[in-house]
Image (tube, rainbow, N blue to C red):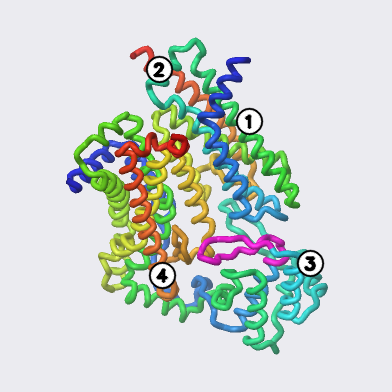
Amino acid sequence: MEKFLKISAVNFKYNLLPHLLVSMLLCLAAPLFIGTRNLDTYQVAKIMEAYLCLLGIILLIPVFIPDMNKDIRDLIASKRMPVYSLHIIRTLWALFFLVLMSLAFLGVLKGENCAFDFGEMFYTVMANALFLGGMGMFVFALFDQAVFAYMIPLVYYVINFGGRKHFGNFYLFSMQVGHFTEKHYLLAGGLIFMAGAVLLRKIVTSFSFVLS
Amino acid sequence: MLISLIKKECSMWMKSIVFYAYVIILIVFYVSQLEGGELIRKPEPGGDDYGYIYSDDENIIMNGTLKDLVCDFESERDFATYPVGFYKSVTLSEGEREQLASCISRLCKMSREEWEQALVEYSAGYSVEYDELGRETVEEKVPWPIVVPSDMTYEEFEAIMEEVSDIIGPGNNYEKENLKEHAEVKMTYEQALLEYDNILYKDKVSGAYARLFCDYIGIILGLLPVFFGTARVLKDKRSQVKEVVYAKKAGTAAIVCSRYLGIVIMIFLPVLLLSFLPMSKAVFVAKTAGVKVDYLAFVKYAAGWLLPTVLFVTAFSYAITELTEGFLAILAGMVVWFTALFSSVTLQWAGWNLIPRFNSLGEYNLFLYLRPQLVANRIFYTVLALMLLGLTLTVYALKRKGVLKNGKVSENLGS
């Protein structure tokens, strides 16, 4: 527990904090870009799918940033605590703040007299955010390139604006036309990406440590 | 020196995964958005859809504007305004809403209770359905009931709309010069034929395709250069060669400018190469119609329209990353891109937006009307890019001299 708290505190101070601030800014700036009062379910879906889901990219991708430097990575690999535990703790904190901010945002929308199913919308934003963030994590783990890790999910998001025909069940904006099924695929895809990323990172770190 | 450094930068990008990802993304974006799109065809008499045009008919302008105003008022959402070209939402107070309701009553010569009741009856018979592709089908059982009476003159209407505009604030959609935008009507055959002639003889076909190309590619170019600027600065940090580069004989301006120009070239070249695809389509249409084509149209449009976007976004990410040595530029770039894309007034608009839009094939006269604001917009972003490049030069020079240390603002303030 002591170790968990120590790792969490270091992660919060040196890694998560700036990304958390940007996420909060994204939430607070929402009324500047989009209407937040008296919205119907389709309009709320639009905010969740096209705006709030970006929190996933902002919060999840930085999970691997602290050990991007090979020397730091080797140092971490030499410790008794397995590297995946470290990544899981960072991922859990990112998820915690993602859930917290999404719930707060949806709560504000409810307070602004928007008509929507709270559980369904929460599921929607989590599915999209985890899919995009998980995709970024996976790309990061695979190529060890932070810039590339931001690039791929952001471009996936941008291309989705062109319509659903190329994306099938992994179309991000399905709720805006009343389709919920895609959200199960996106959530499952996101979780697989995240698990795959942590696993891949473990293999890469152990492998490079053994080689060095 | 500068030329050889630029060459080195370009060859470095040729080995980068970010560059190849960019090229693939550009091609995928083009194919998914533009390939297989419409060809310009001569309109046939008796067709049922020739596209849309803004009407000059005062009656249509008055009724279209009133309908939009009532819908905006009843939705109780904030009003969208663009006071200096950028989006600003305006929330009206209860008193201002009362004044607006009174203006609507004077426009339709009905009491507030009457037009609100009419709207309730209309809404009960109104339904909208979406198909698989997200296209909507609207069904109206009752015709739109809130209209401007026939005895109202256009001058009276304009006077009331001026009051409406004053209540909402500057840069709103109900200002005198924007009223025509509420009068979108279907084109007649004669209008469609005139439009077709403009494309053939004034646009020389390729101009129309070049505008559509710039519209779509501008969307992706508002974001992708961010990754290059960030990647370039962080590459030095990651390879731990910053100090080695600082010690080199090359001047600060040569290092920074060569990196900047290297990125701009590597981003812009694939765009020019990609433009051969829509160009071939334009050549085919021109040959079929037996008219001359402007082969340089894509180069001219891309240089004037897309290059300023590339210059600005690259300079923006380069400056922020040089200053912070982190990933903040990507997040900030994302916010700038998001704001730019979703604050366009219409799909044919420039204002001061980073991503000017012209999402239609043809509409030469509308383009001529928008061209002055587009030119001013592009000059603005080019100047802004040069200023950001100047900032980057200053930051880099200070780092080189050891005045700024790690590029972390907090550390520099603390020292």
Alpha-carbon span between mark 2 and mark 4: 59 Å
Residues behind callouts 4 and 3 on a single chain: yes
Question: Residue under circle 3?
Answer: B120
Crowding at mark 3 (Cα within 10 Å: few <14, some 14-19, many 20+): few
Tags 1 and 3 touching, CB below 8 Å: no
Mark 4 residue element = loop
Q: Residue at x 49, y 34 (%)?
A: A135
Q: Residue at x 37, y 35 (%)?
A: B405
**Residue A208 location (% of width, % of height):** 37, 17
Question: Residue under circle 2?
Answer: A74
Alpha-carbon span between mark 2 and mark 1: 28 Å
Q: Residue at x 58, y 31 (%)?
A: A94
Alpha-carbon span between mark 4 and mark 3: 40 Å
State which chain disc 1 sits on.
Answer: A
Residue B279 vs B327, above or below: the answer is: below
Residue range highlighted in magenta: B72-91
Which of the two discs, 2 and 1, labels the residue nearer the N terminus?
2
Tags 2 and 1 touching, CB below 8 Å: no
Residue B359 in sight in this render: no
Q: Nearer the viewer, mark 2 or mark 4?
A: 2
Alpha-carbon span between mark 1 and mark 4: 50 Å
Residues behind callouts 3 and 2 on a single chain: no
Residue B362: assigned label: 4
Q: Residue at x 41, y 79 (%)?
A: B194
